[in-house]
Image (cartoon, rainbow, N blue to C red):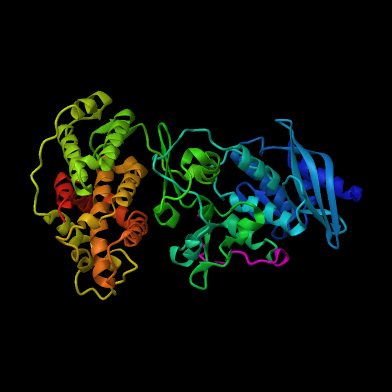
Amino acid sequence: MKPVPTKALRLVQQFLLSSGPPYDFAAHFDTLAPGAMVLIGAHAVPRSEIDRQTYVTRMRAFMDMAGITELGPAFTLERHLDWQPDETGGTLLASIRELKTKTSHGAAFRPEGESWLVRAACLQNKPLPPADVVVARGLAEFAYWRPATDHDVWPMQAIGLGYLRRHTVSTEPLHALPESRFTCQGRGFCCGQIGQWQVTVHANALKAVTAMPWTGLGITGPQFEDGGGRLRDGNVAQMAGCGDNGCAAHVEGRCTLHQSVGWQPIEPCLVFPYQFMDTPDGISVTHSFLCHTVGENQGLPLAAQEADVRLRLAAVRPLVTRVRPLVPLLKNGAVLTWEAYRRLETVLLAILADTSLGPMPARLLRGHQLMTVLVTVFRFAQQIDLAAINQVLASPLPELAMNSGRHVEDLMRFMLKRPGHPDPVRTDRLFGDWHYSAWAVGQGKPLGDAMDDELITRYLRTVLFRKLGLAGVGLAFVWSTVSWAARAWERQARFLEAETGRPIDRMMQLDVARHIDMLFLSTPFLQEMALHIKSHERFVTPRMWLSLSEP
């Protein structure tokens, strides 16, 4: 191994020690190369955009405002393991020790210039990667860190960020449907939809990813568009679509950013297609059917890849919607204890999967029977416990008189674009881009044997298990969402059949699932159903459930 310049080792040690207690901010700033990135609180700032005094002042002010005395893990240099000098500096591989846990870790550093100032650093085991890879991996840690104040610790540099990313993974229970499978197959469909999906990134990701040495890496990185300059909420840029709206970093079926760094630091790309819900007994994990692999149910179950799922969850854990121990049955109505809700969810999931009850419309009708009994029996209740639910479940369900289907048609006339609307009808949008005429194509035309039972069963069980709206407006709303999705499935398939001449096969129904996921469950339309008083009153009633049972 070539000898490491003494000054380079001294600067690396100062870089580490000054970022730990007692935090010598001035000394730490003096170790940084002009191309380095610094973290002030939760905000990444290029070293070139800030002077020494401003950095020191802002760091001190941040610690005072946050009322903290520690900024995260601290490290010291143990020994150097490899050194590769070049024309502009050198790349060092070393063993470092975390002071609180007294554990050793590999780390790479990139000192540059005559003063050997540190441009980048990252956790890194043997072998020593090229200089530009070290820089990219160091910047990736800043890209991962969201500019928000929901963190417990605030490291000053990338090694501390990487340590936390790897070692602060939650241990709370994860729950998933047993039939749910996903392992990325590298299809790149999600990468190809960047322009259409309008994926936004926060300020730290924008600054760090654009600062990566893409020319030195010999590849093209992600491109970004102006996202409206929304600096206050951190979503300042939108990932740009190139070519057919695909991400510029998607090359030959691979993400160049993921390939260079070894993992995915951009939050939406890291988390997709996983969806999480925080419940009193753990995290409910589902997948978005926008992913083709999810639709085809390829890959491993959750239990076989729990560590990977937990790393994805960690990126968004503070953002995950929380369901409290008491959940509404109806908006502004009685509340269910969590044990009572879990019992009902289990029963409804079983009903959706029970083929002995008949095809999916018959299973939904059984669910409508149960939900109608619940909202009738507990109309004036305040709190519903497990014993009360078990008593209802032990009793036979009454037969329900079917109605004309008028209620759902009235709602859709109210919600959708009326005939004669100037917007064009599009086959790549749900109901031709929300036209009532497209919805009406399938009226009175059930799919019958053409319905893909495995696919719609898995989809509707996923929609129920996601619990969208459960925390705010209750179980009855969630069931209405499931019921509406089932009816929309048939109506959209009939619309596509009429417009395109395609047969209603599995491929078309996979498209339908994606349309519902993207254009109903992930849009303000569902929020309108939840929060708009008139829409909600029409959407969440036993009459609506029965109306949705009729084609």
Which residue appears at 46% of the width and 52% of the height? 273
Quarter where residue 464 is shown:
top left
Does residue 373 sit above or below 543 in this rendering? Answer: above
Residue 197: x and y in percent read: 44, 63
In reply to whether residue 220 is colored magenta, the answer given is yes
Left or right of 292 on screen, residue 437: left
Which residue appears at 26% of the width and 72% of the height? 499
* Quadrant location, the C terminus: bottom left
Q: Main secondary structure of the magenta part?
A: loop
**Front-lying residue, 30 or 178:** 178
**Front-lying residue, 41 or 461:** 461
Left or right of 268 on screen, residue 527: left
The answer to whether residue 269 is seen in the rendering is yes
The answer to whether residue 157 is seen in the rendering is no
Does residue 102 sit above or below 462 in this rendering? Answer: above
Residue 282: x and y in percent read: 44, 34
**Front-lying residue, 325 or 283:** 283
Residue 400: x and y in percent read: 10, 42
Left or right of 551 on screen, residue 526: right
Left or right of 448 on screen, residue 258: right
Residue 78: x and y in percent read: 82, 37
Quarter where residue 342 is shown:
top left
Which residue appears at 68% of the width and 37% of the height? 73
In reply to whether residue 548 is colored magenta, the answer given is no
Count of picture labels = 0
**Magenta stretch bounds:** 215-233
Farthest residue, direction top: 387
